[in-house]
């Protein structure tokens, strides 16, 4: 039975290049292309592999990727990104992707990365292993669900009194959550916390 792979990218030329690499690995592979993370979620349950960009409209960056990985923990996942920052590779690895490849990689490297991940291997440069300082995503992930809801409300511009009303909490509880959020994110104020969340969602 032919293997089935999902290519998720909002740039048609990038999807075409990835499709060519898949066909070089396995000419019989069935390819399904998508330009949104939401589409990919509907398709991934029956996939043998997903190759995905993380910088698509509405994808919320690393947060969207983390949610996708939580929903589909067993599907081999290769991230193909235009951002080759080592921190990005490290975050992708921490989320549980099977591999990371820059869009600047050569076609032979793309073919080999796809072959490796399709066969349940891993493909990373090794850059994700370095650094003891937690990344911004790792800091965000230390927040409790309640703290995350408060942070999202802060991002929407709500003040403590409005957040308390919207979430059914006391204002004292909201203040305690805000204080804990700033401490966990290692930022001095609400503005910096909001900016950090915005960067993660890009």
Image (spheres, rainbow, N blue to C red):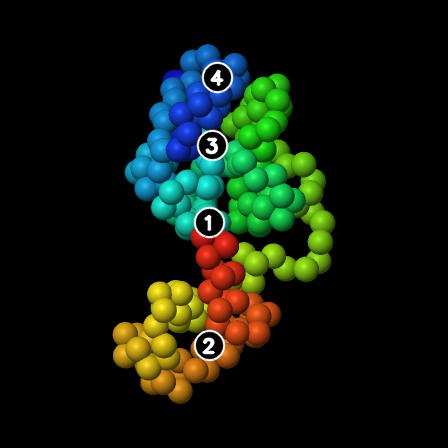
Whichever of labels 1 and 2 marks the residue nearer the N terminus, that label is 2
Q: Residues within 10 Å of mark 1 (few under 14, many from 20)?
A: some
**Residue depicted at 46% across the width and 26% down the height:** 14
Q: Which residue is mark 2?
A: 178
Q: Vertical placement of 55 versus 47: above or below?
A: below
**Residue 186 falls left or right of residue 200:** right
The circle drawn on residue 20 is: 4
Whichever of labels 3 and 1 marks the residue nearer the N terminus, that label is 3
**Residue depicted at 62% across the width and 48% down the height:** 87
Instruction: Report if the CB atoms under discs 4 and 3 are less than 8 Å apart.
Output: no
Q: Which residue is mark 1?
A: 202
**Residue depicted at 44% across the width and 23% down the height:** 13
**Residue depicted at 49% across the width and 21% down the height:** 17
The circle drawn on residue 148 is: none
Q: How far apart, in angstroms, are the residues tagged by discs 4 and 1?
A: 28 Å
Choose top left, top right, bottom left or bottom right for residue 163: bottom left
The label nearer to you, 1 versus 2, is 1
Helix, strand or loop at label 4? It is helix
Choose top left, top right, bottom left or bottom right for residue 5: top left
Whichever of labels 2 and 3 marks the residue nearer the N terminus, that label is 3
């Amino acid at each position: 039975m032919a293997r089935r792979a999902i290519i998720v990218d909002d740039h048609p030329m990038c999807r075409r290049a990835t499709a060519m690499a898949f066909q070089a690995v396995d000419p019989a592979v069935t390819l399904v292309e998508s330009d949104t993370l939401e589409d990919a979620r509907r398709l991934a349950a029956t996939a043998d592999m997903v190759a995905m960009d993380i910088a698509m409209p509405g994808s919320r960056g690393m947060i969207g990727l983390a949610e996708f990985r939580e929903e589909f923990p067993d599907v081999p996942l290769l991230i193909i990104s235009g951002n080759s920052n080592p921190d990005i590779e490290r975050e992708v690895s921490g989320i549980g992707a099977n591999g990371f490849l820059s869009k600047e990689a050569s076609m032979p490297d793309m073919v080999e990365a796809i072959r490796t991940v399709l066969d349940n291997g891993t493909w990373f440069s090794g850059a994700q292993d370095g650094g003891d300082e937690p990344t911004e995503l790792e800091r965000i992930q230390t927040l409790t669900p309640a703290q995350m809801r408060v942070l999202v409300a802060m991002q929407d511009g709500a003040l403590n009194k409005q957040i308390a009303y919207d979430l059914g909490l006391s204002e004292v509880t909201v203040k305690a959550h805000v204080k804990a959020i700033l401490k966990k994110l290692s930022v001095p104020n609400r503005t910096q916390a909001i900016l950090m969340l915005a960067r993660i969602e890009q």
